[in-house]
Amino acid sequence: MVSACLEAYRCTSDDYWFTQARRAFDWYLGRNDLGRFLYDPNTGGCRDGLHVDRVNENQGAESTLAFVGLGDPTRPSWGTMLERANDSGAVASGAWWFFLPPGIGIVLVVLGFTLVGQAIEEIINPRLRERR
């Protein structure tokens, strides 16, 4: 979201998009519904999102933070790969092979964990079993 808003700002020079990018970025820094930080500056890790009453403990958003430049640049990650590809102009030059492997990796890992988590939740949560 941050990257899309910043790109819109670069294309239009409309301050609205810069404000929206900052707002999306600040969400990770505690300006969210629960008032909790999702980004941990000590580890460089980031939680994926919020539940109704707590922070999600998954850390797939590390790639998002690395992409926007907040990750540890010495630590290899898919987000760092995407950031470097973006910074080097791979999109503008049509070099899709810089984006495709880390992008597919992120999608497959997130989808896999989501599906496994939902399956486990259906097994463990009696309210979900009653719906069948």
Image (cartoon, rainbow, N blue to C red):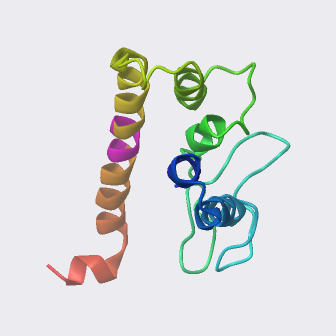
Which residue is at the front of the view, 51 or 90?
90
Report the side of 55 relative to 81 (left or right).
Answer: right
Q: Which residues are magenta?
A: 108-112
Query: Looking at the image, is 96 positioned above or below residue 110?
Result: above
What residue is shown at x 46% (from left), y 20% (from top)? Answer: 90
Quarter location, residue 91: top left
Q: Main secondary structure of the magenta part?
A: helix
Residue 70 sits in quarter? top right
Along the line of sight, the residue nearer the viewer: 126 or 56? 56
Q: Position of residue 121 (x, y in %)?
A: 36, 65
Query: Of all residues shown, which one is farthest toward the left?
Result: 132
Does the magenta run of residues contain 111?
yes
Image location (x, y in percent) of residue 11: 51, 47
Taking the spot 64% from the left edge, 35% from the top edge, the residue there is 66
In which quadrant of the rendered image does the C terminus lie? bottom left
Looking at the picture, does residue 111 appear above or below residue 14? above
Is 52 contained in the magenta span?
no
Provide residue 26's location: percent of width, then percent of height.
72, 63
Determine whether, in the image, residue 99 is placed left or right of residue 9: left
Image coordinates of residue 20 in percent, x first then y, are 61, 65
Q: Is residue 39 left or right of residue 51?
A: right
